[in-house]
Image (cartoon, grey):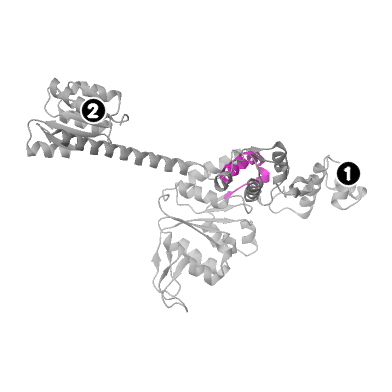
C-alpha cells in the first residue's frame, strides 16, 4: 500500500498520533497535519489518495478542508471525524462530497474498514481514468503506419474533418488502407463510442445489398420469417463505411441517395420510413469523376457523398514508409506465430525498395508474413521472400500524368520511364519497348523527351 498516501488532520496531538500509528501499521503512507491550515499547505503541494480530517478545528475547519480537496482533487476521498455528532452535520458533510462521517469515539476496526473502502475507490477511479487515456491515445494514433509527409498531411486533414458529420469519399488503389483511414476518421469523431459498420458494395447483388443495407419486414420474401434490421439502422448514432461504392447499380444508387437526403430508410417489404442518424464514409479504387462522366455513377449521389475527397497514395509513391511498415508487420507476425525474427537483411530491404508493389501495403504485409513463417532463426533473409521479387523485371509502370491524359501523354510517360530504368541505354530501351533504335529515336524527337 506504499502508493496510497493519506493526509490525517487533527488539532489534538494525541488523537492525531494514535490515528497515524494505526494507519501506518496497516501499510499506508501517512502524512500528519496539526491544523486545517497546515493541511491546506500540504494540499497545495500534492494530491492524496485519502484525507481524514477532524471537523471542529480553529481557523480552518474540516468542512473547509473538504471543500478545498474536492475543488483541487475531485477523485480524492475525504472522511470527517468529530466528537460532536449530529444528524444535521452528517448530512451537511455528505452533501459537500465527504465519503464518510465517523463519530468519536470510534472503533479501530470501523476505521480500517472505511479507509480500505475509500482508498480502493480512489484506486479504481485512477485505473478507469488511465484506461480512458489509453483508449483515447490509441484512437489518436494513426491506424495507417507512416512517416511520409504527404500521408501525415492526409491524416491531419482526416482528423480535422472527423469532428464533423461530413460525408467523405476515400480513393486509392486496392491495398492502400482505405478502410483503415475510415476507422481513423470514426475513432477521432464524436461518434467514436458508437458502432462503425462496414460493407463491400461489390460483394452483393442489388437485392441482397438492399436487404443488407435496409433490412426487411417479416414476410417480405420467402424465408423472411422475422423482421431484420439493416446495417444503416444498426449503425445509427455511429458510422457506416461503404467500400467500393462505385459497384452499386444505378437503381440502388437512387435508393441510397434518399437515405443520404432524408436520413431515413425503408425496410424491404416495409411501408413505414425509419429515421436514422448515420455518418457515411465511402471508398473506391476507381476514378469517381470519370465514373460520373461515363454515366456509371449518378451525379446527384456524387455531390451528396463526395463532400470531402481524400486520396491515399500507393506504396510506390511513399517508399520511405517501407522500412517502418516492415518493422510493424515483423512485430505483428512475431506475436501471432510466437517467433523472434528481429533482423531484416539489407538485401531484403533493398529488394523491397526496388519493387513497386501493385498490391500496395497489403502485398507487403503478405510478403513479411510469409517471411516470418519461413524464417528458421532471428533473421529474415533473401531466401524467405518470393524469388520473383529479386528481378528488376518485376517493376511496374505507373501512369505519372493527369487523370484524363491523352494516349500521346501516356506513351511519353511510359517511354521516359523505360529510358530511366535502363539508364538511357537506347538499345536496351528499344528492346524493352519492342521497337528498333531508329523508331525509338523518332519517338524521342517527336515527343520531345529530354535525356
Q: CA distance from mark 2 to mark 1?
A: 89 Å
Please tell me which residue is depicted at 64% across the width and 37% down the height of the picture.
343
Q: Quadrant of the N terminus?
A: top left
Residue 411: x %, y % from top left? 79, 51
Place of residue 386 in the rendered image (x, y in percent of width and height, measured from the top left): 72, 49
Query: Is 216 placed above or below 375 here?
Result: below
Residue named by callout 2: 25
Q: Give the secondary structure at mark 1.
A: helix
**Dot 1 crowding, Cα within 10 Å, few <14, some 14–19, many 20+:** some
Is residue 97 something one can see in this rendering?
A: no
Q: Which residue is mark 1?
A: 426
Choose between 308 and 94: the one closer to the eye: 94
- Which quadrant of the rendered structure holds the C terminus? top right
Secondary structure mostly taken by the magenta-highlighted segment of the chain:
helix
Relative side of 419 to 271, left or right? right
Range of the magenta residues? Answer: 310-332
- Residue 238 horizontal/vertical position (percent): 43, 55
- Residue 58 lies left or right of residue 207; in this view the side is left
Q: Residues within 10 Å of mark 2 (few under 14, many from 20)?
A: few
Amino acid at each position: 500500500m506504499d502508493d496510497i498516501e493519506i493526509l490525517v488532520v487533527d488539532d489534538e496531538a494525541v488523537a492525531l498520533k494514535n490515528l497515524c500509528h494505526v494507519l501506518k501499521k496497516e501499510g499506508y503512507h501517512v502524512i500528519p497535519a496539526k491544523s486545517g491550515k497546515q493541511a491546506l499547505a500540504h494540499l497545495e503541494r500534492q494530491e492524496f489518495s485519502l484525507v481524514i480530517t477532524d471537523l471542529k478545528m480553529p481557523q480552518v475547519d474540516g468542512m473547509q478542508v473538504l471543500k478545498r480537496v474536492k475543488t483541487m482533487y475531485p477523485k480524492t476521498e475525504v472522511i470527517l471525524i468529530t466528537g460532536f455528532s449530529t444528524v444535521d452535520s452528517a448530512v451537511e458533510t455528505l452533501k459537500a462530497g465527504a465519503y464518510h462521517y465517523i463519530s468519536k469515539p470510534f472503533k479501530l476496526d470501523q476505521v480500517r474498514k472505511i479507509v480500505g473502502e475509500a482508498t480502493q475507490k480512489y484506486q479504481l477511479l485512477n485505473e478507469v481514468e488511465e484506461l480512458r487515456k489509453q483508449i483515447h491515445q490509441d484512437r489518436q494514433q494513426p491506424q495507417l503506419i507512416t512517416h511520409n509527409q504527404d500521408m501525415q498531411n492526409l491524416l491531419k486533414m482526416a482528423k480535422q474533418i472527423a469532428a464533423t458529420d461530413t460525408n467523405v469519399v476515400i480513393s486509392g488503389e486496392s491495398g492502400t488502407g482505405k478502410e483503415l483511414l475510415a476507422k481513423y476518421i470514426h475513432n477521432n469523431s464524436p461518434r467514436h463510442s458508437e458502432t462503425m459498420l462496414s460493407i463491400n458494395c461489390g460483394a452483393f447483388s442489388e437485392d441482397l445489398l438492399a436487404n443488407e443495407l435496409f433490412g426487411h419486414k417479416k414476410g417480405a420474401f420467402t424465408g423472411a420469417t422475422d423482421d431484420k434490421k439493416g446495417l444503416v439502422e444498426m449503425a445509427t448514432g455511429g458510422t457506416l463505411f461503404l467500400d467500393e461504392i462505385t459497384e452499386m447499380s444505378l437503381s440502388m444508387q437512387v435508393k441510397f441517395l434518399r437515405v443520404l437526403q432524408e436520413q431515413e430508410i425503408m425496410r424491404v417489404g416495409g411501408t413505414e420510413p425509419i429515421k436514422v442518424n448515420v455518418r457515411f464514409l465511402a471508398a473506391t479504387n476507381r476514378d469517381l469523376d470519370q465514373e460520373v462522366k461515363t454515366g456509371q455513377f449518378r451525379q446527384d449521389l456524387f455531390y451528396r457523398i463526395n463532400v470531402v475527397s481524400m486520396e491515399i497514395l500507393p506504396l510506390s509513391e511513399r517508399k520511405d514508409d517501407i522500412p517502418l511498415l516492415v518493422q510493424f508487420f515483423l512485430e505483428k507476425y512475431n506475436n501471432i506465430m510466437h517467433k523472434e525474427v528481429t533482423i531484416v537483411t539489407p538485401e531484403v530491404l533493398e529488394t523491397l525498395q526496388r519493387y513497386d508493389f501493385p498490391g500496395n501495403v497489403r502485398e507487403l504485409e503478405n510478403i513479411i508474413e510469409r517471411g516470418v513463417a519461413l524464417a528458421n532463426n532471428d533473421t529474415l533473409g533473401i531466401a524467405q521472400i518470393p524469388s520473383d521479387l529479386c528481378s528488376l523485371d518485376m517493376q511496374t509502370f505507373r501512369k505519372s500524368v493527369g487523370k484524363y491524359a491523352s494516349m500521346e501523354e501516356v506513351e511519353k510517360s511510359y517511354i521516359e520511364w523505360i529510358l530511366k530504368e535502363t539508364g538511357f541505354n537506347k538499345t536496351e530501351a528499344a528492346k524493352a519497348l519492342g521497337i528498333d533504335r531508329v523508331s525509338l529515336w523518332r519517338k524521342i524527337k517527336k515527343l520531345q523527351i529530354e535525356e
